[in-house]
Image (cartoon, rainbow, N blue to C red):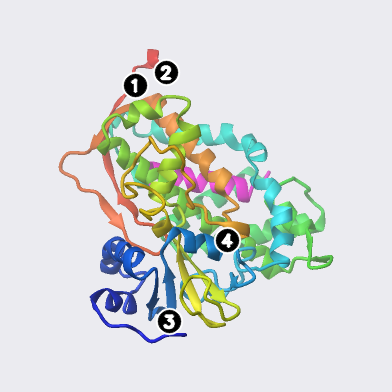
Amino acid sequence: MSSQFRTGPHHEFFEHLDWYREEDCARLPQELAWSRRECPVVHSGYDGGQYVVTRYDDLRTVGEHPDIFSSSTPGVRHVPVLLPPLDLDPPLHRDFRQFLNPYFSRSFLQRYVPEMRRLADELIDDVVDERRIEFVSQFAIPFTAGSLARVVIDDDNESRMRRAIEAVTAVATGDQGAYERVAGIAAEILAERAAGTSDRAGVLQSLVTARVDGGRLLSSAEQLGVVTVLLLGGLDTTRGTIAHIGRYLAEHPGLEQRLRRPEWVKRDLEELLRHTSTVSVMGRTVTRDNELLGHPLKAGDRLAVHWQSGNRDELKFEHADELRFDRRKNPHIAFGVGIHRCIGQHFARLQIEVAVDRLLRRLTNFSIAPGTTVRETAGVVLLAPAELFLSFEPVPERST
């Protein structure tokens, strides 16, 4: 690394920071606030050493200069598998995004909305008479996992599609072995598509026919790497945002009525995204010596770019820690910045819109269930409710 570790309690916290340690994650927001004020590019000893970038403007600089801040190591620790297009730089990154982008446009994703609505309604059917729900495991996880599996796998074999949804849901609940089942199903479908037994339009078909890097087909490792990125990248993030909204409905008086207005999607959704920050922190590698962040960096230095911290930057957002729906401008970076801006941003928005719409059609008067506390999950992606018991009342049928 390009500078020596400085002493002091805050520097020491970052030097010993473990992104996956619960107590560190709980303390991190206050330490990031200190960093934004006093040391916006702060050294950490994690995984061999890296610099944590915390201010909004610096994060935009990183995202807008992929030639200087490479995405070849997109995590805060090294990952031993291919993760295209997440770990690709131009020009190869452009080739992958070019064939994937059409399948994550809002217009293409609209075809899945009826199935997403049906899934949400089925999950609500299971709990409506109980007037109580463990919101994460009974709604947020199965809704996002089912929606994601349908969009990414999108198989015309319904039996296999059901197995895929079950496997993706298991991955979302922490069953790491379930990913092998997902990968096996994806590989099976890819083989069929390559053999020409099905030409159903969608993500998997595009992986078979796309040409990159001057005209070559994707390798099998690249194909499965894309599936990995799309599934794992979409599970925790949108689920976390929906779980946060469930909590906000219980804890913020007036929010339910606000989200019942059709126009909430055009403005209020952006504030919810800023405040929750679906993608918290990612990695970059410096390609050449520079001082673009006001700090001397050397080629080979690694960065942890903390998008969530940028969304809490008081220099950019007044009362940044508060959920405020009266912001005139909201240029949040919840989906990142630049060429690596999240490919699933339209899908995430659509899932949130459908989830809120179906919930509020059927349920009202949310509160934290008596005798329960909200249990948070601590991790590198997102601080979000891991267990959230809500009480509610059914909406009278004549009002639906």
Depth check: give the residue in front, 308 or 24.
308
Horizontal side of 340 relative to 322 (left or right) equals right
If you read the primary sequence from the N terminus, does the residue marked by circle 1 or circle 3 appear first? 3
Q: Residues within 10 Å of mark 4 (few under 14, many from 20)?
A: some
Q: Which residue is mark 4?
A: 229
345 versus 394 height, above or below: below
If you read the primary sequence from the N terminus, does the residue marked by circle 2 or circle 4 appear first? 4
Depth check: give the residue in front, 243 or 123.
243
Q: Residues within 10 Å of mark 3 (few under 14, many from 20)?
A: some
Magenta stretch, residue numbers: 137-156
195 versus 103 height, above or below: below
Secondary structure category for the residue under label 4:
helix
- Asked if marks 2 and 3 touch (Cβ < 8 Å), the reply is no
Q: Amino acid at mark 4?
A: Val
Q: Residues within 10 Å of mark 1 (few under 14, many from 20)?
A: some
Q: Position of residue 42 (x, y in %)?
A: 38, 74
Q: Which residue is mark 3?
A: 49
Q: Based on the displayed image, in which of its 4 quarters is residue 210 positioned?
A: bottom right
If you read the primary sequence from the N terminus, does the residue marked by circle 3 or circle 4 appear first? 3
Q: Position of residue 159 (x, y in %)?
A: 60, 46
Alpha carbon distance from label 2 to label 4:
38 Å
If you read the primary sequence from the N terminus, does the residue marked by circle 1 or circle 2 appear first? 1
If you read the primary sequence from the N terminus, does the residue marked by circle 2 or circle 3 appear first? 3
- Asked if marks 1 and 3 touch (Cβ < 8 Å), the reply is no
Q: Which residue is mark 2?
A: 400
Q: Which residue is mark 1?
A: 395
Q: Amino acid at mark 2?
A: Thr
Alpha carbon distance from label 1 to label 3:
53 Å
Horizontal side of 78 relative to 308 (left or right) equals right
Picture residue at 48% right of the left edge, 27% below the top: 263
